[in-house]
Amino acid sequence: MTAKPKSSRPASTGPKTKSAAPEQKNITVPCPDTDDPAEVASTLSRDIPDWDNLDKDERSELAQLIIAHRKRGTPARVKLIKKPGGGYSIDLDGKSDMLAALKLHETFAANSLDPVNARASELIKYLDSVGACNDGRYNAALSFIESMEPKDQAEALLLVQMYVTHDAAIRALSMLGSAEWVPTVQTYGNLATKLLRVSQGQMETLARMRRGGEQVVKHIHVDNRGGQAVIAESVHNGGQGNGKNDTQPHEQSPCGPALLGHDPQAFGMPITGIEGKEAVPVARRTVAGRS
């Protein structure tokens, strides 16, 4: 029979206790129903405990931020309920179901429930696929879409794509940061690069949609006469109905170097008035026998 080695761990001196979780701090933001700085300051002095610790500039800044916060309003919020058989259902969150439903319709620029359900389902499928389907992440997506104020359902659809593309790009970058092998770094680096390029293209597409197809054409003319460069710039705006480029020649200077035509390999077009004055032939000649 052999003796068991004694454990090097110290003996327990009492019952085990779990480490206390850090207490969450809840901040209630007062929203005075006025834009008068004096009334706002009076309300904040009563409702904010740390008001006396702020200087004059900090109080003014806080009052302005609270006024802007009240004007933005409360974003649409929902609660995700996991179904027993799989999937999620959406429950409206707020004091009034009608107000919450109308906010959700406005978020997706929809007049009926069908497009709202379609966009909501797309967000749920993506978040569930990455293990992040919870109230916080879903409401964050709703807040982003609402802040962009989609004008129609096409913009709402594009904004959903922008959110999930950005999230996927951030996930690829986080995997890139924790990768240890070169092939893994290359894989996630290429994926992040492609996703960020797609995200940039989506932003440009949204900008073009909101411009209505307007095109901005700049014509820049450089005149290097006398060793001094003079740049003249003109801007022409054209929409969907005006796709014609301005190819008319501009006013020529009375003197200066040769101007190139549309073909960069062609010879320059000479401009009169730079070679100097020449003798002008006599228009009339003397004819013998005539006075």
Image: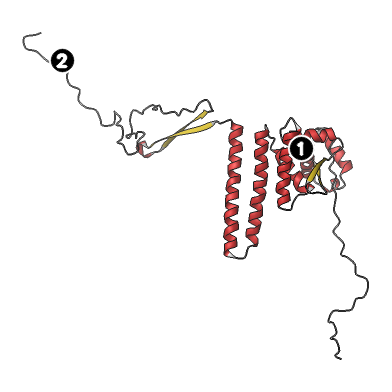
Percent of width and height locating residue 106:
74, 33
Viewer-proximal residue among 90 and 21: 90
Furthest toward the bottom, the residue is 1
190 to 30, vertically: above or below: below
Furthest toward the front, the residue is 85
Viewer-proximal residue among 129 and 98: 129
Q: Quadrant of residue 254?
A: top left
The answer to whether residue 50 shows anywhere in this view is: yes
Percent of width and height locating residue 239:
54, 28
53 to 179, vertically: above or below: above
Viewer-proximal residue among 9 and 289: 9
Q: Residue at x 86, y 89 (%)?
A: 3
Return the residue at label 2: 284
| Mark 1 and mark 2 residues within 8 Å of each other at the beta carbon | no
Return the residue at label 1: 68
Mark 1: amino acid: Ala
Viewer-proximal residue among 207 and 175: 175
Q: Residue at x 49, y 33 (%)?
A: 217
Q: Quadrant of residue 283?
A: top left
Q: Is residue 117 left or right of residue 30?
A: left
